[in-house]
Image (tube, rainbow, N blue to C red):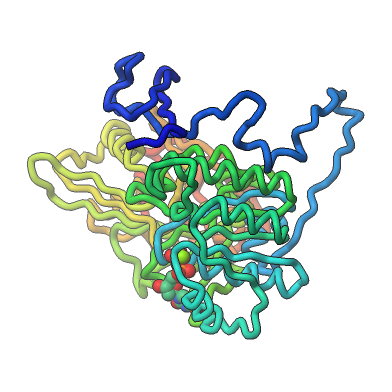
Amino acid sequence: MAKDKSIFTCTECGGTSARWMGKCPHCEAWNSLIEGAAEPAAGKNRFGSAHASLAPTSPVLPLSEIEAADFERHPTGIDELDRVLGGGMVEGGVVLIGGDPGIGKSTLLLQAVDALQRSGMQTLYVTGEESGAQVALRSRRLGLMASQVSVLPEIQLEKILHTLQARQPGIAIIDSIQTVYSDQLTSAPGSVAQVRECAAHLTRTAKATGTTIVLVGHVTKEGALAGPRVLEHMVDTVLYFEGDTHSNFRLIRAIKNRFGAVNEIGVFAMTEKGLKGVSNPSAIFLSQHSEPVPGSCVMVTLEGTRPLLVEIQALVDSGGPSPRRLSVGLDRDRLAMLLAVLHRHAGVACMDQDVFVNAVGGVRISEPAADLAVMLAITSSLRGKALPKGFIAFGEVGLAGEVRPAPRGQDRLKEAAKLGFQVAIVPKANAPKKNDKAFEGLTIHPVERIEEAMNLVRSMG
Ligand code: TYD
Ligand code: MG
């Protein structure tokens, strides 16, 4: 039973109810009631205390009269992490870091707070998933001897807030937000209502005290941060861990950053002594084939500032009555679209075939510049013929069969040339002018349409 301090709000019509019901009593929507704390008496907002220093009514001023103070940044000293953060942790900033279990969130954050503590910052590591002893064990394993990081094993929000107010650390890690619960709500830790309420309180505290707060969040099977996407709106920076837990490489991507560029990536290798930055990552996502194999095509992605070469693999195999289309690391709807374009504009039919595509190494590629490589890998698998040795391709493919340019195409080509690739098929608008030394050794074939690309590949044998 709900206590009287809870109230349930309908996500559809905004109506409220004193108890949980399957159907909203106002708009009759099903399963739309979400628990929240009841509004306290007038003048006593439940965010009041943490909010106090922001509360005095601020004067309205023209922008030009407001001093544009830069953010106070604290580099963690872990270069790849600082890169995704946009230069370091920001005072009063709130960072959400998500990823699969076991991918290395706790490891990286412990390394980061230890480095900050050694640089003289007060730190606090709140652990709700592991005991203090387990965190200590990890720190020994990481070789962080005589670490002065303060650890608080606690999951109750009010106690955590109290410690934050009392100690005013420079940075606090909450590992993880799903384990924290507030007394104000009756729902279980990890529920949407709890996660949202706790994150909101912690965010207010960060802004009021200037403490940087890092929230660790779990990812559901579908790949979204468990519970609410609403967390993403509340915080300043959202980082996601990517990569295959079976491979040694981990990627961290900034998908939102109020203090830096988005889509910037940091690359790490998991070692016995924790995560180590990889400063020159462009070639780590290539599998090592001694001879080219059918169904494989390398592309150059450029998300953030660094080009990254990723191998796209496809397997086309005769399917049953309803053939399957599966993709790992690439968008499945886009795959269906590309198959239709292949059929219609290049005469390559996969209607009765199962089609599987995979981006090697657990990387997620969201940019459409992967289209051309995906289509070439599929046709290569279907024909059972490998693409030439040292081959790369990139470019977006439209519904009309046109090959559109990818942003910063020349930077991608330069990276491929640097790594010794020899043949490239690229959108016409991305092709460099003749005689540029930077592309030496790389024969570049510009194309405007998908059929051109297919014919070129066929002529290559
Ligand atoms: P962890 O940081 O606990 O993951 P998360 O907090 O994201 O759930 O790291 C988990 C994995 O990393 C674990 O399976 C063991 C491995 N690991 C190493 O390989 N080397 C190390 O130095 C450490 C601490 C962990
Ligand atoms: Mg953990």
Classify the position of the N terminus by image quarter. Answer: top left
Count up the numbered dots: 0
Residue at 57 percent across and 74 percent down: it is 276
Find the residue positioned furthest to the top. 26
Based on the displayed image, in which of its 4 quarters is residue 218 positioned?
bottom left
Residue toward you, 160 or 377: 160
Q: Is residue 278 left or right of residue 53?
A: left
Q: Position of residue 384 (x, y in %)?
A: 23, 57
Q: In this rendering, is residue 419 above or below 332? A: below
Residue toward you, 104 or 168: 168
Q: Is residue 92 left or right of residue 94?
A: right
Query: Do we see residue 17 in this rendering?
Result: yes
Q: Is residue 381 left or right of residue 397?
A: left
Q: Position of residue 55 (x, y in %)?
A: 75, 33
Q: Position of residue 404 (x, y in %)?
A: 50, 36
Find the residue positioned furthest to the right. 65
Q: Position of residue 245 (x, y in %)?
A: 39, 67
Based on the displayed image, in which of its 4 quarters is residue 103 positioned?
bottom left
